[in-house]
């Protein structure tokens, strides 16, 4: 029965859409509690007492260890052997941190070393990429081009295009090329960055669909 319960849970993990966390309360005196470590469920340190029983809250962060990576680890280990503790070096950013990382990446779009050090290269957005820095540059360039297909985003798109794809040396030069005052240009540029950040943030949370 316990095996059936566990595999039902595994199936639920794999089928769930946009799953961020899963939690399980386990009796601390349960002899089979080690199996939860096998499933990469970690003790959060929060224990609850009910009558004479103590319960441990275990959890798994699916944003840090996605389902396919987790399943590969599970299948690569024997039934009596705990899986390797190494986890991919993915980071989980807040929306504000994510937006700041987008701004930094856009500023350093031609500079490979700067892009390689950007935290976006270690997010789910680029997980599994052989060359994350190049993938990040291509992702941002494609995002700017995609914005140009939006008939309501012409001005933000042009500001992004001139600034980051056509390589205007300064914001003043970009504003002059566009025939705009510096304040108007910056308003359009910020609107474009926010649009791209929001779109990529949704993809980070929900996947490309």
Image (cartoon, grey):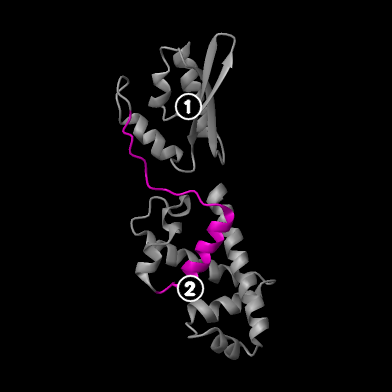
> Who is closer to the viewer here, 198 or 17?
198
Does 38 sit above or below residue 2? below
Q: Is residue 208 visible in this depiction of the protein?
A: no
Label 2, on which residue? Answer: 107
Start-end of magenta stretch? 83-110
Residue 190, image quadrant? bottom right
Q: Nearer the viewer, residue 41 or 72?
A: 41
The quadrant where residue 199 appears: bottom right
Q: Within 10 angstroms of label 2, few (less than 14), some, or many (20 or more) residues? A: some
Report the side of 135 relative to 99 (left or right): left
The answer to whether residue 111 is left or right of residue 144 is left
Residue 103 magenta-highlighted:
yes
Percent position of residue 169, x then y: 48, 86
- At horizontal 47% and vertical 13% (from top left) the residue drawn is 2
**Does the magenta run of residues contain 154?**
no
Image side of residue 187 versus residue 203, left or right: right
SS at mark 1?
Answer: helix
Please tell me the numbered disc located at residue 196.
none
Residue 94: image location, x then y, percent:
56, 52
- Spot occupied by residue 101 in the image (x, y as percentages of width and height): 50, 62
Q: Disc 1 designates what residue? A: 10
- Helix, strand or loop status at disc 2: helix
Residue 132 seen in the figure: yes
Question: Label 2 vs label 1: CA separation?
Answer: 42 Å
Vertical comparison of 33 with 152: above or below? above
* Residue plotted at (40% across, 74% down): 110
The quarter of the picture where residue 197 lies is: bottom right
Q: Residue at x 41, y 12 (%)?
A: 31
Dot 2 or dot 1: first in sequence order is 1
């Amino acid at each position: 029965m316990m095996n059936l319960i566990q595999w039902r849970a595994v199936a639920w993990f794999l089928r769930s859409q946009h799953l961020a966390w899963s939690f399980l309360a386990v009796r601390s005196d349960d002899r089979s509690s080690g199996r939860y470590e096998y499933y990469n469920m970690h003790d959060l340190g929060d224990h609850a007492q009910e009558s004479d029983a103590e319960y441990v809250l275990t959890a798994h962060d699916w944003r840090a260890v996605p389902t396919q990576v987790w399943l590969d680890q599970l299948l690569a280990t024997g039934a009596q052997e705990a899986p390797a503790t190494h986890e991919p070096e993915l980071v989980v950013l807040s929306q504000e941190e994510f937006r700041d990382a987008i701004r930094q990446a856009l500023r350093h779009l031609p500079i490979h070393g700067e892009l390689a050090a950007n935290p976006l290269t270690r997010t789910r957005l680029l997980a599994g990429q052989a060359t994350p820095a190049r993938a990040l540059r291509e992702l941002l360039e494609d995002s700017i081009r995609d914005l140009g297909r939006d008939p309501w985003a012409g001005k933000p798109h042009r500001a992004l295009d001139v600034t980051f794809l056509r390589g205007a040396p300064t914001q003043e030069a970009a504003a002059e090329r566009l025939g705009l005052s510096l304040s108007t240009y910056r308003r359009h540029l910020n609107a474009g960055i926010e649009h791209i950040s929001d779109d990529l943030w949704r993809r980070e949370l929900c996947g490309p669909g």
